[in-house]
Amino acid sequence: MNYILETERLALRELNENDASFILELLNTDGWLKYIGDRNVKSEDQASDYLMNGPIKSYKDNGYGLYLVELKSEKIPIGMCGIIKRDNLELPDIGYAFLPMYYGLGYAFEAAKQTLNYAEFNLNLNKILAITNPDNFSSIKLLEKLGFAFQKFIKAPHDGAELRLFSKILGK
């Protein structure tokens, strides 16, 4: 398996069409729907389309994207984490989402910390952004633990919802 990143407990790799059933599950969790939004992915075919037009397209267009996070020992997919280039943000941002049964175990921090190292040393980024729903307190706490600082409130392009924008200078 070609892993992009590895930590003590996790391995991150590019998503592919074989991950459609996992993506279908992840994108329909309560946390995803509440804090990220309904992507209208209700079938494996729609999950494949999401993968082809999202992460897989990003790998080709940007050289990076969201990666599947799996438990290294069991090779079980538990979430995704990576770098995203959004049209409405001036710089790339970090994104992550995990299945609820893996919340609170340090996996998001572990994956995100390694992703930030990858952004700095492999992608040569010197600053990275993050956006979150204003009431997603666990995500805000994680971003602060990773060294992100709140910058300002912005509006989401698709629905005008208020989001918190964070930034981090890499290498600090």
Image (cartoon, helix red, strand yellow):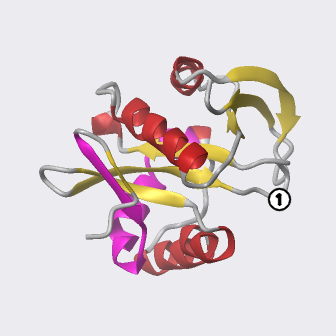
What is the x, y in percent for residue 15? 43, 68
Which quadrant is the C terminus positioned in?
top right
The residue that disc 1 covers is 87
> Could you say whether the residue bearing mark 1 is in a helix, strand or loop?
loop
- Which residue sits at x=72%, y=49%? 92
* Residue nearest the observer in this picture, 48 or 170: 170
Which quarter of the figure has residue 110? top left
Q: Which amino acid does label 1 sit on?
A: Asp
Q: How crowded is mark 1: few (under 14 residues within 10 Å), some or many (20 or more)?
A: few
- In magenta stretch: residue 16: yes
- Which residue sits at x=58%, y=63%? 64
Left or right of 11 on screen, residue 152: right
- In magenta stretch: residue 88: no
The magenta stretch is 9-34
What is the x, y in percent for residue 27? 48, 55
| 114 up-or-down from 62: above or below | above
- Which residue sits at x=45%, y=58%? 67
* Residue nearest the observer in this picture, 91 or 124: 124
Residue 33 makes an appearance in the image: no
Which quadrant is the N terminus positioned in?
bottom left
What is the x, y in percent for residue 58? 63, 69
| 167 up-or-down from 58: above or below | above
